[in-house]
Image: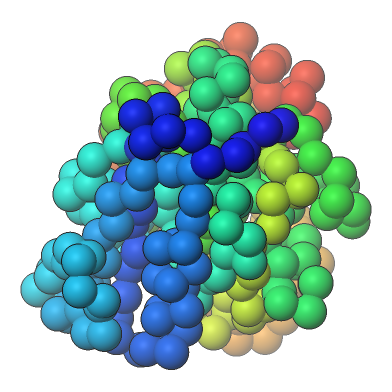
Amino acid sequence: MDVSDPRPHDRPTVGVVVLTMNDRPREMAEALASLRAQRGVELDIVVVGNGCVPEGVPDGLRTVSLPENVGIPEGRNVGARHVAGEYLVFFDNDAVLPTVDALARLAAALRADPELAYVQPRIADPDGTTLRRWVPRLRSSDPGRGGVATVMAEGVVLVRRSAFEEVGGWPGHFFLFHEGIDLAWRLWDHGYTGRYTPEVVVHHPATSPARHDGFYRLTARNRVWLARRNLPRVLVPLNLASWLLLTLARTRGHALRVSFQGFAEGWRGDYGRRAPMSWHTVRRLTRAGRPPLV
């Protein structure tokens, strides 16, 4: 695919949203530098301070300060409203684009296919390691195999703005975890598809999500919310039963107890608007290799 630098009026326009809590000054400086070095695209970058005033932001970039930490998905929703562009990039503040044409190549994929709503690059640690949770499909042992993606790794993803707005953006009340599956399912239910393009690589430290406070509780709670919001009623218990079996197999001790507390919270709490996907979407996801049960 030819991604040579086109004339300015031909370049894809991309709004970039970066969140910060001012806890990674060195990493964010590297992230922003790699974004500003991109060629072949017109970028509009905003740094959203989630409960803070962003620090260390280079001159020429805009910032938004939120008085409290509203969580990652809602922070990204806020950022999306403050940038222009036909496409949106949601970019972790410790990620780095190692090549100057990465965003142009992702945007070219969206331009070439109007049914494509999002493109997921291969996220890899700088040493080349790609964690299984970063590969947006089942059978993730080979991260170099691309193709259709029915979910997404939220840390670095390019989304068609019109599709993003059509489905209502990220589920802001999730705060953290599973928001990418929720958004991907809603995009598929509106007739779109996703793609995993491992030939475009983004560097990201291979850290454990369990480092976050509330990891086990929020993961369990949001799994219930995800199913209750998006699945036909008959599939809700099947989806959650598969998750419970995996949790019992993988989790022990205090983490297991907290997971069950989060699971119960998901049934008590307000999961938001219920808009179950059609059975046509269930079939499409199944044909694409990931039925909405796992």
Q: What colour-coding does the image apply?
A: rainbow
Total tally of numbered discs in the picture: 0
Please, is residue 84 above or below residue 274 in the view? below
- 122 vs 191, nearest the viewer: 122
Q: Quadrant of the C terminus?
A: top right
Residue 179 visible:
no
- 72 vs 156, nearest the viewer: 156
Extreme residue toward the top, this view: 280
Q: Where's residue 27, x and y in %? A: 47, 83
Q: Residue at x 30, y 37 (%)?
A: 85
Q: Where's residue 138, x and y in %? A: 80, 44
Please, is residue 23 above or below residue 264 in the view? below
Left or right for 126, reference 71: right
Extreme residue toward the front, this view: 7
Please, is residue 39 above or below residue 14 in the view? below
Q: Quadrant of the N terminus?
A: top right
Q: Where's residue 225, x and y in %? A: 43, 46
Residue 213 placement: quadrant: bottom left
Left or right for 153, reference 6: right
Residue 26 placement: quadrant: bottom left
Q: Where's residue 25, x and y in %? A: 37, 89
Q: Residue at x 25, y 60 (%)?
A: 46
Residue 205 visible:
yes
Please, is residue 135 above or below residue 159 in the view? below
